[in-house]
Image: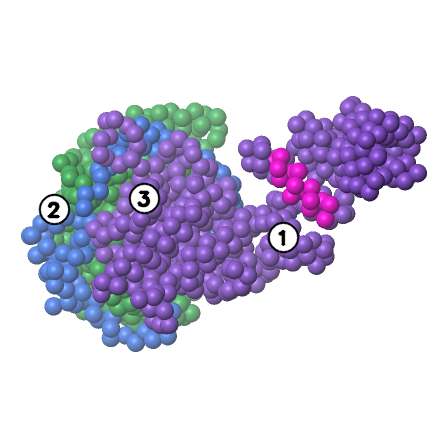
Chain colours: A green, B blue, C purple
Amino acid sequence: MEIFDLTIHELHDKLKAKEVSSVEATRAMLDRIEAVDSQVNAYITVTPEQALVEAEAADRRIAAGDIAPLTGIPMGLKDIFITKGVRTTCGSRILENFVPPYDGTAVAKLKEQGAVIVGKLNQDEFAMGSSNESSYFGPVKNPWNLECTPGGSSGGSAAAIAARTATATLGTDTGGSIRQPASHCSCVGVKPTYGRVSRYGVIAYASSLDQVGPLTRDVTDAAILLGAIAGYDPKDSTSVNTPVPDYLAGLKTGVKGLKIGLPKQYFIEGLDPDVKRAMEEAIALYKSLGAELREVSLPHTEYAVATYYLIATAEASSNLARYDGVRFGHRADEIRGLKEMYAKTRAEGFGSEVKRRIMLGTYALSSGYYDAYYVKAQKVRTLIMQDFLNAFNEVDVLLTPIAPTPPFKIGEKLADPLQMYLSDIFTIPVNLAGTCGISIPAGFSAAGLPIGLQLIGKPFGEATILSTAYAFEQETQWHLKKAPL
Amino acid sequence: MKITRAEVEHVARLARLELTDAELDTFTGQMDGILAYVEKLNALDTDGIVPTSHAVPMENAFRADEPTGSIGVENALANAPQRAESFFRVPKVIE
Amino acid sequence: MKYQVVIGLEVHTQLTTNTKIFCGCSTKFGSEPNSQTCPVCLGFPGALPVLNRQVVEYAIRAGLATNCSITQRNVFARKNYFYPDLPKGYQISQFDLPICQHGHLDIEVEGETKRIGITRIHMEEDAGKLVHADISEVGDDSCVDLNRACTPLLEIVSEPDMRSPDEAIAYLKKLHQIVMYLGICDGNLEEGSFRCDANVSLMPVGSTVFGTRAELKNINSFKFIKQAIEYEIERQAEILDDGGKVIQETRLFDPNTGTTRSMRGKEEAHDYRYFPDPDLVPVLIADQWIEDVRAELPELPEAKRARYVTELGLPEYDAEVLASSRELAQYYEETVALFPQAKIVSNWVMGEVARALNDDNNRSITDCPVTPALLADLLKLMEKGTISGKIAKTVFDEMYKTGKAPERIVEEKGLVQVSDTGAIEAMVDEVLNNNPGQVEQYRGGKETVFGFFVGQVMRASKGKANPAVVNELLLKKLKA
């Protein structure tokens, strides 16, 4: 077992026992990045000097007996997180050289605990994508099969876990962007309830859907990391002032008597046979552990993708208006006048997926179409939320696949954006409903590619999905399998 | 056709995106396909349904009227593509 | 043809909060460019707005003072457009649910009262400034200063109810007075704290169908408002007389020429794509909040003026002048509280105090070195007969210069009024003896000479003789 293979809690124990120092752990991680990241392309920016300074500070803190769960742990951040003094690109050319003057709240919380940030992780440009192919900094490869995508948009955050180039990472999830790559890379990913984690200092894609969450090697780490970043933040008007439970303490609650719902709209024809089999095995396992499983209905599921692409693109078209070449970021050369500055700067700075979504969103908000598209989508969103509320009157947790298929090949779906969008059908409804979901490793396809399982909880029911996931993990041990890298 | 090339051009102007002819063609086709797909929402009767803008009910998030300090001129301008003294510099409006 | 002008006004008032509407940066005017900025008001990636509660409070104040109904559920919307002074590429404003609606103000023009409707008042953030700085290397380029970006504004939109430039001015002055009374705006037109756009159209006299309007922008003084509207009336009348059509457009007022010019071409056809800002949450205003604000509203100028007339017995003119500004009224009321003779205080405040401040570079009443307490002390000395009215003015000037208490000045300068009959009688005798010719004239029936004697005695006493005693003694001696 190498230092870079360890989980947060394992490394924490060793740091606490002074069997290993944070500097050693950080060096090991930086060496590992050096050794394998050229194959994976999970990192956009690696910050070795700063990481070692932070590691030294963590070691001093540990020596003084002041160790928090994340003190000295080498972590990576999706490049959507604003980091003071460290380039933050969001996977885009338009922010290629942007060095922010401030830290976001989640990052500040990690730093307060003394976590060591080793670098910024690759992602789909502005988190728009399901395959990490829209990054200006090149696609990320799936460590389980370098010809496959790691999923997206937090593809770098998931791939770094699988490649063991970060002990844990943070990602963001707008329509599945944590859970789907976690599933494709066989790691644990949590999309918390909207408002659970501050969005301050997280570059916005779709403000009413974006949420920050952890990607980790196991469920225990997810509980630790979520506990570290969750909580009310007065700098985010949409953060919710609800106490954060001790997720770690509740992990071993078990599933005896737990009512698990199986939404019939998620177990459809066309589900990949390997995925179907993995779901059946999971259902059988939960039954054997004493959970009560029953079918439920989320009748508006088939409308979720259409609803999502209207709401998300509309918000994005406005959120991305600030990239105008005036105050920061790329500005086109050779421009004549202000109008040209805008049009050329944005044309050069944004990639085609981002442009496509800005166009779609601008259209959906434009005069004469607003009610037909945007307002209509917000109304259907209400129906989708209602579906979940109804289901949660009957059950405690929902069990579903994350994606209809195991990871797909790089380039396979690029030509047809709509097909790519449709692959997010099982993750998108959770964002629309604003509730929480977790992806956990649930086995492998015949070709050896990871398959994930989704557990969806009630709003602010993170503790329940974590303990439900933990019970599964303890029985299956899928999370212990390492990518061949 | 849900959207014409001319409409796509108009949207590009609104969004301040200079698109090539090839991009305009591609986007026209793709947007047309996506808009045809989202038509399916019209199958749902949403009369009387309240639109949701936040999935979690929220209201009245305020801050007190107390200064929290600025970041300073140099931090404000550090990323500027072009500056002049303490200003951001931009090309003039050409009609 | 004869035309009737139709005017509606949109006023942007900058609120006097300490900090901006969505971040904690200062709203101070005139600092180094971009020194009052942070990730939020610079529109940096990842930054989020949080609403300043004081802005809502001020908006409620404005709504109540203009007889509006207050909207219980408020939503902020994004108004999307690109301009270098607009950091986020959208302005956070209110769209279909403004915080105040359906209000009115009563104005008086040529003795007639007229009611002007207020359509709406909404909260929004100001943009920064695009300036053409005098920096040689910059050439034609523009410079952006974002200190003003994100400063809280109330946009106050009137109905098109005004029918003359004078009505427009009367409405604006009234509104200006109210926002300053409410303490929500400093009213500084030059610094842009109170900005006005005017929608002006013409229709044939007798018609009820409004013509096409032009929106006039960049009018930053009451004088310019009048000029701009008058110019616009002329311009539109000429077009209509020639059988042309007025185009709906935005026109910029040029204070140098007193004319307006079209901004066409600079503006593309706008499609603002309003939608609810997902970064902000609804503002729910409970009745209790409204009542709390109402309870703390200051007495407004109209009510104050009426009270001065009915309760204090002041003439209309005095009441109007004293109630014209909250600070002046406060000064007056504080003085009256200590020296309860309303008219005498009014005379002094409108007379000596106003004159002294005026001569002193239009100093503000709040900085007046003669505080209400000192002024009341002075008036008490006069009332007791310690000093004469004339001496009181001398003492006042000294108080204004030095800030000293009146008693001390009177003492130091020996200005105590002489009421001792013996001393005054000696002076009277002397004056009469020295001026036998005038005494002759008086006794011969020319009573106007009396004033001459009074003046002579007062001069002999260096103004300190009690005028009542002087009068009495003079009469007695001359009639003897």
SS at badge 3: loop
- Could you tell me which residue is drawn at 25 percent across and 43 percent down? A323
Residue type pointed to by label 1: Tyr
Left or right: residue B9 versus residue C326 is left
- Could you tell me which residue is drawn at 23 percent across and 49 percent down? C266
Q: Nearer the viewer, residue A186 or C117?
A: C117
- Residue A294 image position (x, y, % from top left): 35, 70
Residue designated by label 1: C317
* Mark 2 surroundings: few (<14), some (14-19) or many (≥20) residues within 10 A: some
Which disc number belongs to residue C257?
Answer: 3
Disc 2 chain ID? A
Q: Nearer the viewer, mark 3 or mark 2?
A: 3
Residue C355 within the magenta-colored segment of the rendering? yes
Mark 1 to mark 3: distance in Å? 36 Å
SS at badge 1: helix
Q: Nearer the viewer, residue A320 or B65?
A: B65
* Mark 3 surroundings: few (<14), some (14-19) or many (≥20) residues within 10 A: few
* Image quadrant where residue B33 sits: bottom left
- Residue A485 image position (x, y, % from top left): 18, 39
- Could you tell me which residue is drawn at 23 percent across and 56 percent down? C269
Label 2 close to label 1 by CB (< 8 Å) = no
Residue designated by label 2: A147
- Residue C175 image position (x, y, % from top left): 50, 54
Q: Are marks 3 and 2 on the same chain?
A: no
- Whichever of callouts 1 and 3 sits on the residue coming sooner in the sequence is 3
Residue type pointed to by label 2: Glu
Give the magenta part as a residue range.
C343-357
